[in-house]
Image: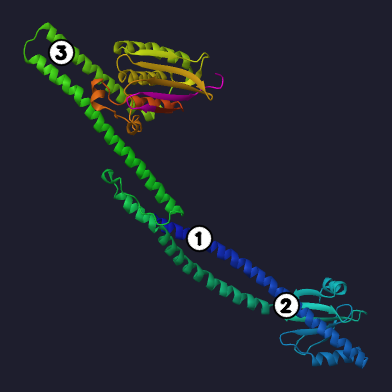
Amino acid sequence: MFGSIRTRLTLWYAGVLALSLVAFASLVYYWAAGTFYERQDESLRSTAETVASAYQEELAEVKSVNKANEVLLSEIVFPNRYVEILDTSGRPVAWSTNLNGNLTSVPESTLLLARQRGAGYSTANGLRVAVVPLSSKTEIGFAAVAEPVSVIDEELHRLRSDVFAAVPLILVFASFGGYFLARKNLAPIELMNEQTQLITARSLSSRLDVGNSHDELGRLGTTINELLARLESSFNEQQRFIADASHELRTPLAVLRGETEVALNRSRSAEEYRDSLALIQDEAERLSRIVEDLFVLARQPLTAPKMIKERVSLTETVRDCGRAAEVLASRKQVRLKTETDSTNLILSGDDELLKRMILNLLDNAVKYTDVGGEVLLSLKRKNGNAQITVADNGVGISQSDQEHVFDRFYRVDKARSRAHGGAGLGLSIAQWIVDAHAGNIKVESEFGKGSKFTVELPLTQAS
């Protein structure tokens, strides 16, 4: 039961609401109590001032203090309130007929406050007493009016009873309302859960229903849908990778198997065995290149963060690659020209990966350049970056194919690529190496006139 978010939210809501209600009720109660007592004092003071005013009028008329006391107190009677006339020392000299006996003696401090501020208050024997001077001009005594404190206590008791009855009732209704709101607002999560459970590897194209994409749950659903889209793309790419890899491996394996079966089928001359072994060697080398490229591509997500970062002289790297590629170019009877910047260009990266990237581009350029053609490898500084260019005047790439040349296993001319031993992985590996070095690579080509691959890599500030 408590494992449900709805229940926990309702309990948290009810707990916070209960504390808030108790705190609010306490503040209201103490504020009300203070207000009630303050109003009682004001009312008692007003009554005492009325008595004092009437006493002065009566005294002015009868010219006798005793007579004024008797007449005034016999005529003035307040329900639940008691009146006394005190002399200057605070002793009672007269009192209302509803008072049996005298009030408790008024403290001297209360009389002092009455002289100084016009009114003084005290509490004794369950009575609240207000004292005011009979005259503001001469000190002839005091008027004291008292009322039972229980009058206020009864009001506060009713207030406490109302609060004790209202708080639990409000809490119950609010808890039910909170549970209903929590259930309604969490319903989309339950729907997402049900829909997510139905999504498998065969149904990655499914998406969650998103009602309001602007609230928190809507943004969560949108994020999950974007995650599913990325998973679908990765899964489809993985399937294509496996299918293409299987296809690429099948051909050399079939050649190896077929050639060995033919060679073993009957006795052959040494020359024929040599030809068979040469063919097997070529296919084995091709198979090794494919497996090595596949291994590099499969490790891309792991090797990129762990790439060796060292100070690399890009100028020396380009020159080394140019010299190495001259062997490939001479076999194809293609001219290879290398041009580098006069200054030594330095960057931070992996020298071996950079050489692999450049050699892949050169190998690709030599393969698709006809006999007598030319390949240019150049390095120069441009806008604070190192710019490596590999250009050829070979067969070129059509505009539609240029968008896919960096895709794995993509080959512009599959038959021609297979004849040259290509598997469509070189450019993909080159792009990954460039990305790992925070650079960019692009291709410019015109079909039948040649291609130019341009790589830009960030240089270190010191270079």
Q: Identify the image quadrant of the C terminus.
A: top right
Left or right placement of residue 81 versus residue 251 in this view: right
Q: Residues within 10 Å of mark 1 (few under 14, many from 20)?
A: some
Residue farthest along the left direction in this orientation: 266
Mark 2 surroundings: few (<14), some (14-19) or many (≥20) residues within 10 A = some
Residue type at mark 3 is: Ser
Q: Which residue is mark 3?
A: 276
Residues at circles 2 and 1 in contact by the CB criterion of under 8 Å = no
Whether residue 125 can be seen here = no
Element on which disc 2 rests: helix
Secondary element under disc 1, as helix, strand or loop, is helix
Image spot of residue 6 (x, y percent): 42, 58
Q: Of the residues shown, which amino acid type is indicated by label 2?
A: Gln
Relative to 311, residue 6 above or below: below
Q: Is residue 223 above or below residue 49?
A: above
User: Of callouts 2 and 1, which one flags the residue occurring earlier in the amino acid sequence?
Assistant: 1
Q: Secondary structure at mark 3?
A: helix
**Above or below, 152 relative to 17:** below
Which residue appears farthest toward the top when viewing the image? 270
Quadrant of the image occupied by residue 134? bottom right
Between 120 and 240, the one lying in front of the other is 240
In the picture provided, is 19 more to the left or to the right than 74? left
For the N terminus, the quadrant is bottom left
Is 118 rendered above or below residue 421?
below
User: On the image, numbered disc 2 is attached to which residue?
Assistant: 40
Q: Residue 76 at x, y = what percent?
A: 79, 90
